[in-house]
Image: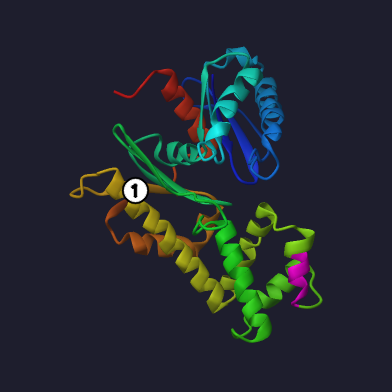
Amino acid sequence: MYLGVDGGGTKTAFCLVDEDGTIVASARTASIYYLMSGLEIVEPLLAQGVAEVCASAGIEANDIAYAFFGIPCYGEVLPDVPKLDALPRNVLGHDRYRCGNDMICGWAGSLGAADGINVVAGTGSIAYGENGELTSRAGGWGELFGDEGSAHWVAIRGLNAFSRMGDGRLPRGPLADILRARLDLTDDLEIVDVVLNRWQGDRAQIAALSTAVSEAAEAGDTASAEILRDAGRELADMVDAEARVLKFDTRQLIPVSYSGGMFTSPLLLAAFRQALDGRYDLREPLFPPDHGAALYAARLSNGPRT
Protein backbone atom coordinates (compact mmCIF):
# COMPACT_ATOMS: atom_id res chain seq x y z
CA MET A 1 0.00 0.00 0.00
CA TYR A 2 1.20 3.50 -0.87
CA LEU A 3 -0.13 6.69 0.70
CA GLY A 4 -0.33 10.07 -0.98
CA VAL A 5 -1.26 13.26 0.88
CA ASP A 6 -2.08 16.46 -1.00
CA GLY A 7 -2.26 19.43 1.33
CA GLY A 8 -4.10 22.13 -0.59
CA GLY A 9 -5.07 25.63 0.46
CA THR A 10 -8.61 24.69 1.50
CA LYS A 11 -8.45 20.94 2.23
CA THR A 12 -6.07 18.02 2.67
CA ALA A 13 -6.71 14.91 0.55
CA PHE A 14 -5.44 11.43 1.45
CA CYS A 15 -5.24 8.60 -1.09
CA LEU A 16 -4.16 5.01 -0.51
CA VAL A 17 -3.33 2.85 -3.54
CA ASP A 18 -2.21 -0.73 -3.97
CA GLU A 19 0.78 -1.95 -5.97
CA ASP A 20 -1.24 -1.70 -9.20
CA GLY A 21 -2.03 1.97 -8.55
CA THR A 22 -5.70 1.25 -7.81
CA ILE A 23 -7.31 3.46 -5.17
CA VAL A 24 -8.10 1.49 -2.04
CA ALA A 25 -9.23 4.28 0.28
CA SER A 26 -9.42 8.06 0.48
CA ALA A 27 -10.16 10.74 3.07
CA ARG A 28 -10.43 14.51 3.46
CA THR A 29 -9.52 16.81 6.33
CA ALA A 30 -9.14 20.56 6.77
CA SER A 31 -6.19 22.28 5.15
CA ILE A 32 -2.69 21.91 6.64
CA TYR A 33 -1.74 25.35 5.29
CA TYR A 34 -0.11 26.33 8.56
CA LEU A 35 1.34 29.79 7.93
CA MET A 36 -1.79 31.52 9.21
CA SER A 37 -2.77 29.06 11.96
CA GLY A 38 0.56 27.73 13.24
CA LEU A 39 2.60 24.57 12.80
CA GLU A 40 0.69 22.82 15.57
CA ILE A 41 -2.33 22.22 13.28
CA VAL A 42 -0.40 19.90 10.95
CA GLU A 43 0.18 16.73 12.95
CA PRO A 44 -3.41 16.30 14.27
CA LEU A 45 -4.83 16.70 10.76
CA LEU A 46 -2.34 14.24 9.31
CA ALA A 47 -3.14 11.78 12.08
CA GLN A 48 -6.88 12.14 11.40
CA GLY A 49 -6.53 11.51 7.67
CA VAL A 50 -4.12 8.60 8.02
CA ALA A 51 -6.38 6.96 10.62
CA GLU A 52 -9.39 7.30 8.31
CA VAL A 53 -7.76 5.79 5.21
CA CYS A 54 -6.21 2.97 7.21
CA ALA A 55 -9.53 2.15 8.89
CA SER A 56 -11.28 2.21 5.52
CA ALA A 57 -8.69 -0.15 4.01
CA GLY A 58 -8.54 -2.39 7.08
CA ILE A 59 -4.81 -1.91 7.60
CA GLU A 60 -2.45 -0.39 10.15
CA ALA A 61 -0.18 2.57 9.46
CA ASN A 62 2.79 0.22 9.64
CA ASP A 63 1.37 -1.66 6.62
CA ILE A 64 1.97 1.40 4.41
CA ALA A 65 5.03 0.62 2.30
CA TYR A 66 5.80 4.26 1.56
CA ALA A 67 4.10 7.65 1.80
CA PHE A 68 4.51 11.08 0.29
CA PHE A 69 3.24 14.16 2.12
CA GLY A 70 2.70 17.22 -0.08
CA ILE A 71 2.65 20.18 2.28
CA PRO A 72 1.70 23.74 1.25
CA CYS A 73 4.64 26.16 1.58
CA TYR A 74 7.07 23.33 2.28
CA GLY A 75 10.61 24.62 1.71
CA GLU A 76 9.63 28.28 1.90
CA VAL A 77 10.30 28.72 5.62
CA LEU A 78 13.65 26.98 6.04
CA PRO A 79 13.60 26.60 9.86
CA ASP A 80 10.26 24.75 9.54
CA VAL A 81 11.55 22.08 7.13
CA PRO A 82 13.11 19.72 9.71
CA LYS A 83 10.04 20.09 11.91
CA LEU A 84 7.71 19.20 9.02
CA ASP A 85 9.96 16.32 7.99
CA ALA A 86 9.67 14.84 11.47
CA LEU A 87 5.89 15.07 11.92
CA PRO A 88 4.79 12.08 9.78
CA ARG A 89 7.06 9.79 11.80
CA ASN A 90 4.82 10.34 14.82
CA VAL A 91 1.74 9.60 12.71
CA LEU A 92 3.00 6.55 10.79
CA GLY A 93 5.30 5.06 13.39
CA HIS A 94 8.01 4.49 10.78
CA ASP A 95 10.39 6.36 8.45
CA ARG A 96 9.15 5.11 5.10
CA TYR A 97 8.01 8.48 3.79
CA ARG A 98 9.14 11.77 2.32
CA CYS A 99 7.78 15.28 2.59
CA GLY A 100 7.78 17.89 -0.16
CA ASN A 101 5.86 20.83 -1.54
CA ASP A 102 2.30 20.07 -2.61
CA MET A 103 3.15 21.24 -6.14
CA ILE A 104 4.71 17.80 -6.67
CA CYS A 105 1.31 16.17 -6.12
CA GLY A 106 -0.26 18.11 -8.98
CA TRP A 107 2.61 17.30 -11.33
CA ALA A 108 2.69 13.59 -10.43
CA GLY A 109 -1.06 13.28 -10.87
CA SER A 110 -1.52 15.25 -14.06
CA LEU A 111 1.43 13.74 -15.94
CA GLY A 112 1.67 10.36 -14.21
CA ALA A 113 5.02 11.35 -12.64
CA ALA A 114 6.61 11.63 -16.10
CA ASP A 115 8.84 14.40 -17.46
CA GLY A 116 6.99 17.61 -18.20
CA ILE A 117 5.52 20.69 -16.53
CA ASN A 118 2.39 21.06 -14.45
CA VAL A 119 0.71 24.29 -13.37
CA VAL A 120 -1.41 24.40 -10.23
CA ALA A 121 -4.04 27.12 -9.94
CA GLY A 122 -6.06 26.57 -6.80
CA THR A 123 -6.16 28.89 -3.80
CA GLY A 124 -2.58 29.77 -4.77
CA SER A 125 -0.61 29.07 -7.94
CA ILE A 126 2.69 27.45 -8.79
CA ALA A 127 4.34 25.49 -11.59
CA TYR A 128 6.58 22.47 -11.17
CA GLY A 129 8.39 20.38 -13.72
CA GLU A 130 10.94 17.63 -14.15
CA ASN A 131 13.22 16.73 -17.02
CA GLY A 132 15.45 13.81 -16.17
CA GLU A 133 17.41 14.82 -13.09
CA LEU A 134 16.45 18.49 -13.44
CA THR A 135 13.60 19.84 -11.30
CA SER A 136 12.28 23.38 -11.03
CA ARG A 137 9.42 25.52 -9.76
CA ALA A 138 8.04 28.88 -10.85
CA GLY A 139 5.53 31.11 -9.09
CA GLY A 140 4.19 30.26 -5.66
CA TRP A 141 5.45 33.47 -4.05
CA GLY A 142 2.35 33.91 -1.89
CA GLU A 143 -0.80 35.97 -2.08
CA LEU A 144 0.67 39.35 -1.09
CA PHE A 145 2.93 39.75 -4.14
CA GLY A 146 2.57 36.57 -6.17
CA ASP A 147 0.27 33.59 -6.84
CA GLU A 148 -0.72 35.09 -10.19
CA GLY A 149 -3.63 33.33 -11.85
CA SER A 150 -4.76 31.70 -8.60
CA ALA A 151 -8.22 31.83 -7.04
CA HIS A 152 -6.99 34.37 -4.50
CA TRP A 153 -5.41 36.52 -7.25
CA VAL A 154 -8.58 36.37 -9.36
CA ALA A 155 -10.75 37.21 -6.34
CA ILE A 156 -8.61 40.20 -5.37
CA ARG A 157 -8.79 41.49 -8.94
CA GLY A 158 -12.55 40.93 -8.81
CA LEU A 159 -12.87 42.86 -5.57
CA ASN A 160 -10.90 45.69 -7.14
CA ALA A 161 -13.25 45.70 -10.13
CA PHE A 162 -16.24 45.74 -7.76
CA SER A 163 -14.84 48.79 -5.97
CA ARG A 164 -14.30 50.57 -9.25
CA MET A 165 -17.85 49.76 -10.33
CA GLY A 166 -19.08 51.05 -6.97
CA ASP A 167 -17.59 54.52 -7.35
CA GLY A 168 -17.99 54.90 -11.11
CA ARG A 169 -14.46 54.23 -12.36
CA LEU A 170 -15.79 51.18 -14.25
CA PRO A 171 -19.19 50.66 -15.87
CA ARG A 172 -21.40 48.64 -13.54
CA GLY A 173 -21.54 45.05 -14.78
CA PRO A 174 -23.02 41.75 -13.55
CA LEU A 175 -20.14 41.32 -11.07
CA ALA A 176 -21.57 44.08 -8.88
CA ASP A 177 -24.92 42.40 -8.32
CA ILE A 178 -23.40 38.92 -8.03
CA LEU A 179 -21.02 39.99 -5.25
CA ARG A 180 -23.72 42.01 -3.49
CA ALA A 181 -25.95 38.93 -3.43
CA ARG A 182 -23.11 36.55 -2.49
CA LEU A 183 -22.06 38.68 0.50
CA ASP A 184 -25.57 39.90 1.39
CA LEU A 185 -24.55 43.54 1.08
CA THR A 186 -26.99 46.41 1.55
CA ASP A 187 -24.41 48.95 0.35
CA ASP A 188 -21.33 48.54 -1.84
CA LEU A 189 -19.03 50.03 0.80
CA GLU A 190 -20.08 47.30 3.24
CA ILE A 191 -17.70 44.95 1.41
CA VAL A 192 -14.82 46.63 3.28
CA ASP A 193 -16.33 45.53 6.59
CA VAL A 194 -16.94 41.98 5.36
CA VAL A 195 -13.51 41.31 3.85
CA LEU A 196 -11.23 43.31 6.14
CA ASN A 197 -13.06 43.26 9.48
CA ARG A 198 -15.25 40.16 9.63
CA TRP A 199 -12.98 37.93 7.56
CA GLN A 200 -9.75 39.63 8.67
CA GLY A 201 -8.48 39.17 5.11
CA ASP A 202 -8.75 35.37 5.40
CA ARG A 203 -7.02 33.78 2.40
CA ALA A 204 -9.46 30.92 1.82
CA GLN A 205 -12.60 33.04 2.19
CA ILE A 206 -11.28 35.60 -0.26
CA ALA A 207 -10.19 32.92 -2.73
CA ALA A 208 -13.71 31.46 -2.71
CA LEU A 209 -14.95 34.68 -4.33
CA SER A 210 -13.16 33.67 -7.54
CA THR A 211 -16.29 31.70 -8.41
CA ALA A 212 -18.23 34.97 -8.38
CA VAL A 213 -15.80 36.36 -10.96
CA SER A 214 -16.30 33.27 -13.13
CA GLU A 215 -20.08 33.53 -12.77
CA ALA A 216 -19.98 37.22 -13.72
CA ALA A 217 -17.82 36.51 -16.77
CA GLU A 218 -20.34 33.93 -17.95
CA ALA A 219 -23.06 36.55 -17.48
CA GLY A 220 -21.23 38.94 -19.81
CA ASP A 221 -19.18 41.00 -17.36
CA THR A 222 -16.27 42.28 -19.48
CA ALA A 223 -14.03 43.18 -16.53
CA SER A 224 -14.39 39.69 -15.05
CA ALA A 225 -13.73 38.06 -18.41
CA GLU A 226 -10.51 40.04 -18.80
CA ILE A 227 -9.40 39.03 -15.29
CA LEU A 228 -9.76 35.36 -16.21
CA ARG A 229 -7.92 35.85 -19.51
CA ASP A 230 -5.11 37.60 -17.67
CA ALA A 231 -4.97 34.70 -15.24
CA GLY A 232 -4.55 32.21 -18.07
CA ARG A 233 -1.73 34.27 -19.56
CA GLU A 234 0.03 34.58 -16.20
CA LEU A 235 -0.08 30.81 -15.72
CA ALA A 236 1.34 30.27 -19.21
CA ASP A 237 4.24 32.57 -18.30
CA MET A 238 5.17 30.10 -15.56
CA VAL A 239 5.32 27.30 -18.12
CA ASP A 240 7.65 29.32 -20.34
CA ALA A 241 9.96 29.99 -17.39
CA GLU A 242 10.02 26.30 -16.46
CA ALA A 243 10.75 25.21 -20.02
CA ARG A 244 13.85 27.42 -20.11
CA VAL A 245 15.19 26.28 -16.74
CA LEU A 246 14.55 22.59 -17.39
CA LYS A 247 16.37 22.74 -20.75
CA PHE A 248 13.81 20.78 -22.74
CA ASP A 249 14.65 20.03 -26.35
CA THR A 250 12.90 22.85 -28.23
CA ARG A 251 12.59 20.65 -31.30
CA GLN A 252 9.95 18.58 -29.51
CA LEU A 253 6.64 19.52 -27.92
CA ILE A 254 7.00 19.72 -24.15
CA PRO A 255 4.35 17.83 -22.12
CA VAL A 256 2.27 20.26 -20.04
CA SER A 257 -0.76 19.71 -17.84
CA TYR A 258 -2.66 21.50 -15.11
CA SER A 259 -4.50 21.04 -11.84
CA GLY A 260 -6.55 23.14 -9.44
CA GLY A 261 -10.04 24.58 -9.42
CA MET A 262 -9.32 27.68 -11.52
CA PHE A 263 -8.85 25.51 -14.59
CA THR A 264 -12.56 24.69 -14.48
CA SER A 265 -13.07 28.17 -15.95
CA PRO A 266 -13.43 27.76 -19.73
CA LEU A 267 -12.23 31.33 -20.30
CA LEU A 268 -9.09 30.86 -18.21
CA LEU A 269 -8.26 27.50 -19.78
CA ALA A 270 -8.77 28.89 -23.29
CA ALA A 271 -6.48 31.85 -22.55
CA PHE A 272 -3.89 29.49 -21.05
CA ARG A 273 -4.02 27.28 -24.14
CA GLN A 274 -3.77 30.23 -26.52
CA ALA A 275 -0.81 31.73 -24.64
CA LEU A 276 1.08 28.43 -24.92
CA ASP A 277 0.86 29.05 -28.66
CA GLY A 278 1.32 25.48 -29.91
CA ARG A 279 4.81 25.10 -28.45
CA TYR A 280 3.66 22.55 -25.91
CA ASP A 281 1.76 19.28 -25.78
CA LEU A 282 -1.07 20.38 -23.49
CA ARG A 283 -2.68 17.34 -21.88
CA GLU A 284 -5.72 16.87 -19.69
CA PRO A 285 -4.73 15.69 -16.20
CA LEU A 286 -4.46 11.92 -15.82
CA PHE A 287 -5.23 11.81 -12.10
CA PRO A 288 -6.08 14.22 -9.28
CA PRO A 289 -3.20 15.43 -7.08
CA ASP A 290 -3.84 13.10 -4.12
CA HIS A 291 -3.76 10.07 -6.45
CA GLY A 292 -0.60 11.50 -7.98
CA ALA A 293 0.98 11.80 -4.54
CA ALA A 294 0.32 8.11 -3.92
CA LEU A 295 1.83 7.16 -7.29
CA TYR A 296 4.83 9.32 -6.44
CA ALA A 297 5.17 7.50 -3.10
CA ALA A 298 5.30 4.20 -5.01
CA ARG A 299 8.03 5.61 -7.24
CA LEU A 300 10.04 6.86 -4.27
CA SER A 301 9.86 3.45 -2.64
CA ASN A 302 11.83 2.06 -5.58
CA GLY A 303 14.75 4.44 -5.01
CA PRO A 304 16.18 7.28 -7.13
CA ARG A 305 15.34 7.66 -10.83
CA THR A 306 17.80 6.11 -13.25
Please indicate whether residue 215 sits to the left or right of residue 125 in the image. Answer: right
Can you tell which quarter of the image residue 15 is in?
top right
Please indicate whether residue 266 sits to the left or right of residue 182 in the image. Answer: left
Give the magenta part as a residue range.
Answer: 188-194
What percent of the width, then of the height, locates residue 40?
70, 32
What percent of the width, then of the height, locates residue 4?
54, 29
- Residue 125 position (above or below residue 11): below
Can you tell which quarter of the image residue 199 is in?
bottom right
Residue 146 visible from this viewpoint: yes
Residue occupying image coordinates x 61% and y 46%: 9
Can you tell which quarter of the image residue 64 is in?
top right
Q: Which residue is mark 1?
A: 242
Residue farthest to the left?
Answer: 251
What percent of the width, then of the height, locates residue 228?
50, 66
- Residue 289 position (above or below residue 141): above
- Of residues 270 and 197, the one drawn nearer to the viewer in this rendering: 197
The image shows a total of numbered marks equal to 1
Residue occupying image coordinates x 59% and y 58%: 152
* SS class, disc 1: helix
Quarter of the image that includes the N terminus: top right
Residue occupying image coordinates x 64% and y 66%: 212
Q: Is residue 166 magenta?
A: no
Q: Is residue 192 magenta?
A: yes
Tell me the crowding category of disc 1: few under 14, some 14 to 19, or many 20 or more residues within 10 angstroms, Cα based: many
Quarter of the image that includes the C terminus: top left
What percent of the width, then of the height, locates residue 32?
65, 38
Q: Amino acid at mark 1?
A: Glu
Residue occupying image coordinates x 35% and y 63%: 275
- Residue 51 position (above or below residue 62): below
Q: Main secondary structure of the magenta part?
A: helix
